Amino acid sequence: MAATTSITPAAKIRNFTYAIRNIVVEAKKVEAAGRRVRYLNIGDPIPFGFKTPPHLVEAVAKAMRDGHNGYAPSAGIEPVREIVAAEYERRGMPVGADRVILTSGTSEGIELALGALAEAGDEVLVPTPTYPLYTAVLAKLAAKAVYYRTDPSQDWLPDVDDIKRLITPATRALVLIDPNNPTGAVYPEATRRALIELASRAGIPILADEVYSELGFEGHTPLLGSLEPDAPILSFSSLSKAYLAPGWRAGWLAVGRSDRLDDVLAAIKKLADGRLCSPGPMQHAIGAALSGDRSHQRDFVKALQVRAGLTMTRLNAIPGITCVAPKAAFYVMPKVELPAGKTDEDFVLGLLRATGILCVYGSGFGMPAKDGFFRVVFLATPEELGSIYDDLAAFTSSFVSA
Ligand SMILES: Cc1ncc(COP(=O)(O)O)c(C=O)c1O
């Protein structure tokens, strides 16, 4: 006779949360009730009309036509690893191609690095607010995310003293997201140097998430490793943001040249063997992206600046909302003054149900729910954003006075 009790998943998956996508369940209910949802939850430029550069599309199509449809080597195809290494060298963080791994997006680089570094019970320093994949992967590893503060009154800069206090013998890595999602912050050189110094002394590797480094409004953000090429730094990036191809899952990681990282590199390669390879034809597009024309970035960044300016003017004009200006990418993290007893989730779900605008609550990024932060993705057209901010203002007025 067949057993009828349900099969239980692993308990640790309870802590695997990814609010950016989890909240879509609520949006679908709103859509099912007949209201149009305006999705400002995911940082994907494509649904907002931005186009993948044609030479990248052609590189993938050509790779497929030329028969590159088999498994690639686990670390990625050699000529493309060399192009990535040359890009790192050009940007001041010299690494050999043997220290570059091609990955399924930045996400897989994060997963490989955390998997290679953290045991169950180990600690990894993660910013608040954070990009939530870090905490989700740590939950999967049964390791512990230890939050360090970034401060909205200081342009969302990391609090270096807070980080110093949080380091323990169990600390295995420091995560730095710069330029930052969800805050749009770009860290000044002095802060970056202080963090490198701190991590180097403590013998802790820095996981440098640099997926937005080419989307700064004041120009490219230097690679963290360019400040100190011998520091224990692992850098991640991809084609998802600055090359407008997020669905391709084409990314890379570079392990700094310090021999202190050799064993970690070997562990990452071992893990990479187990997942066979990242998508092969898309690896060819990485080569085309990093050795070809990047003029699309000028137009993209210009468009982002216009939207950032509009977003700042409109959000800061709403009574009860304050917002720190972003310096890169396409996110802001405004704060709403919550009425007593309300949470950021109450605000975001209320906004969704009343207006169809879908943002993500700050607690999904590790912020206290009572602090009233929420994240806005400002990729929509200025006209669309204008109408969104009209509705947001009207809803906020009724919410804060309720
Ligand atoms: C800071 C940060 N890291 C990593 C990722 C994941 O990027 P990818 O598409 O390259 O996996 C994102 C996506 O939004 C991100 O914002």
Image: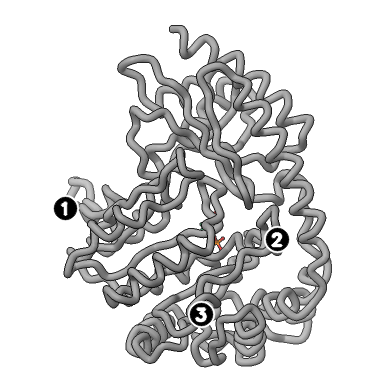
Tell me the CA gap for discs 1 and 2.
67 Å
Sooner in the amino-acid sequence: mark 1 or mark 2: 1
Residue behind mark 2: 219
**Is the shortest distance between ligand 1 and the CB of mark 3 under 8 Å?**
no
Q: Earlier in the sequence, mark 3 or mark 1?
A: 1
Residue at the top extreme, as displayed? 402
Q: Position of residue 34 (x, y in %)?
A: 61, 21
Q: Which quadrant would residue 60 be assigned to in this image? A: bottom right
Is residue 253 visible in the rendered image? The answer is no
Q: Callout 3: few (<14), some (14-19), or many (20+) C-alpha neighbours within 10 Å?
A: many
Q: Residue at x 57, y 37 (%)?
A: 376
Q: Which residue is mark 1?
A: 1
The residue to which callout 3 is attached is 254
Q: Amino acid under label 3?
A: Ala
Q: Decide: is 325 above or below 321.
A: below
- Report helix, strand or loop for mark 1: loop
The percent position of residue 24, horizontal first and vertical second, equals 50, 37
For the residue marked with disc 2, what is the amino acid? Gly
- Of tags 3 and 1, the one toward the viewer is 3
The residue carrying pointer 2 sits among few (fewer than 14), some (14 to 19) or many (20 or more) residues within 10 Å by Cα, namely few
Q: Secondary structure at mark 2?
A: loop
Q: Position of residue 152 (x, y in %)?
A: 46, 40
Coordinates of residue 272 in the picture (x, y in percent): 43, 81
